[in-house]
């Protein structure tokens, strides 16, 4: 519990700083759009690529972990799509709200996972996170862009437009490039890696400031039922999905616990930027991020404890 608290505290501090900067008009509201664009198009994709380039993918049960995580993502996709007509009919949930609920249910915060796993398991655990990024991030971003394009408005966009939205997504390209360089064992000139490292380090700080600037605290203090759908799906259902598939593929020990950590973390911050860019409910996303991160103080230690019971080191 103490380790998790120490890791989450600076995350909240940065989000709070972004909120203060916007509230006090130190950085005016209209200036944040430029920072968000740099994060989305440069900082986040660079971090994904650098992490995958450096990861030791040979030291882990690659196939079983990758299959478990991929099937967990697909399970969440099927469940959320099945829930859409139910939420629309009985809760009158509109398209923009549904896309944000879908995002906060399917995304995961790799930054928190990296920080916790590095402290608990060291470099072998980091390799698990890299596999999770390689498998989950491209698929998650692909399906989220498709869902946003398809449901953010009643009018279905042309297939050509949807394909373009997916193909130009920089997060997908960052993961694919990093994974390709790693698997092909392509040497990267050290000054280039230093540049990638510097850009990647900027991702977390700048991204959290942007999320903080976009927070609507009063919405988070009184969470709507839409927020609670995302909380239940992300912090409860996703760890269950991952645990079932890991057990099915016979994954045990450190790999099991590290993969469960990836499932336990709250939703990713950068989905907020995608919601703003593509017309989703950004306020709902911001409130969901806040509520999930607060609750993760309790849920992450609980999931790690249960993972240790199911598969001790």
Image (spheres, rainbow, N blue to C red):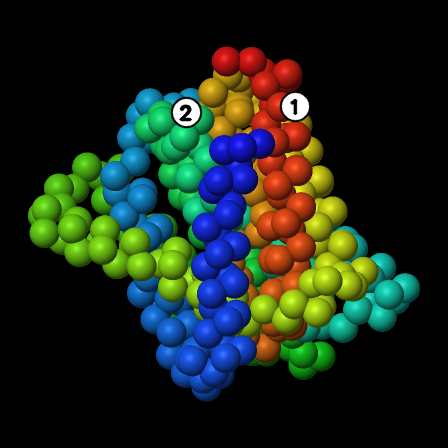
Mark 1: few/some/many CA within 10 Å (<14, 14-19, 20+): some
Residue drawn at x 50%, y 33% as measured from the top left: 3
Closer to the camera, 155 or 172?
A: 172
Report the residue marked by disc 2.
121
Going from N to C along the chain, the mark reached first, 1 or 2, is 2
Mark 1 → mark 2, Cα distance in angstroms = 17 Å
Left or right: where 279 falls relative to 200:
right
Q: Which residue is mark 1?
A: 306
Q: Position of residue 78 (x, y in %)?
A: 69, 49
Q: Residue at x 54, y 40 (%)?
A: 5
> Quarter-wise, where is residue 35 in the image?
bottom left
Judged left or right of residue 83, residue 199 is: left
Residue 14 % position (x, y)? 46, 59
Residue at the extreme right of the image, as rendered: 90
- Residue 142 place in picture, x, y as percent: 50, 58
Quick check: 216 left or right of 41? right
Residue 231 lies left or right of residue 18; in this view the side is right
Give residue 283's mark. none
Q: Quadrant of the N terminus?
A: top right
Please, what secondary structure does the residue beneath circle 1 have? helix
Position above or below: 33 against 216: below
Q: Give the x, y percent position of residue 257.
A: 53, 25
């Amino acid at each position: 519990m103490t380790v998790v608290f120490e890791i989450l505290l600076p995350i909240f501090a940065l989000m709070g700083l972004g909120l203060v900067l916007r509230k006090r008009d130190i950085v005016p509201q209209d200036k944040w759009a430029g920072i968000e664009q740099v994060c989305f198009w440069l900082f986040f994709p660079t971090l994904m690529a650098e992490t995958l380039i450096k990861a030791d993918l040979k030291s882990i049960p690659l196939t079983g972990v990758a299959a478990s995580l991929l099937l967990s993502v697909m399970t969440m996709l099927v469940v959320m799509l099945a829930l859409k007509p139910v939420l629309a009919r009985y809760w009158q949930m509109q398209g923009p709200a549904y896309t944000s609920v879908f995002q906060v249910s399917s995304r995961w915060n790799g930054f928190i996972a990296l920080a916790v796993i590095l402290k608990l398991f060291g470099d072998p655990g980091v390799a698990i996170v890299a596999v999770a990024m390689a498998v989950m991030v491209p698929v998650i971003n692909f399906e989220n862009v498709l869902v946003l394009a398809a449901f953010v408005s009643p009018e279905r966009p042309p297939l050509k437009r949807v394909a373009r939205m997916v193909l130009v997504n920089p997060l997908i390209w960052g993961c694919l490039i990093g994974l390709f360089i790693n698997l092909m064992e392509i040497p990267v000139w050290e000054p280039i890696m230093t540049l990638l490292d510097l850009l990647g380090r900027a991702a977390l700080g700048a991204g959290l400031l942007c999320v903080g600037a976009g927070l609507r605290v009063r919405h988070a203090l009184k969470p709507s039922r839409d927020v609670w759908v995302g909380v239940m799906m992300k912090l409860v259902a996703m760890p269950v999905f991952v645990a079932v598939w890991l057990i099915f593929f016979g994954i045990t020990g450190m790999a099991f616990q590290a993969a469960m950590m990836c499932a336990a973390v709250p939703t990713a911050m950068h989905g907020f930027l995608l919601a703003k860019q593509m017309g989703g409910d950004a306020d709902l996303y911001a409130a969901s991020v806040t509520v999930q991160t607060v609750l993760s103080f309790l849920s992450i230690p609980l999931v790690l404890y249960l993972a240790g019971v199911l598969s001790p080191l």
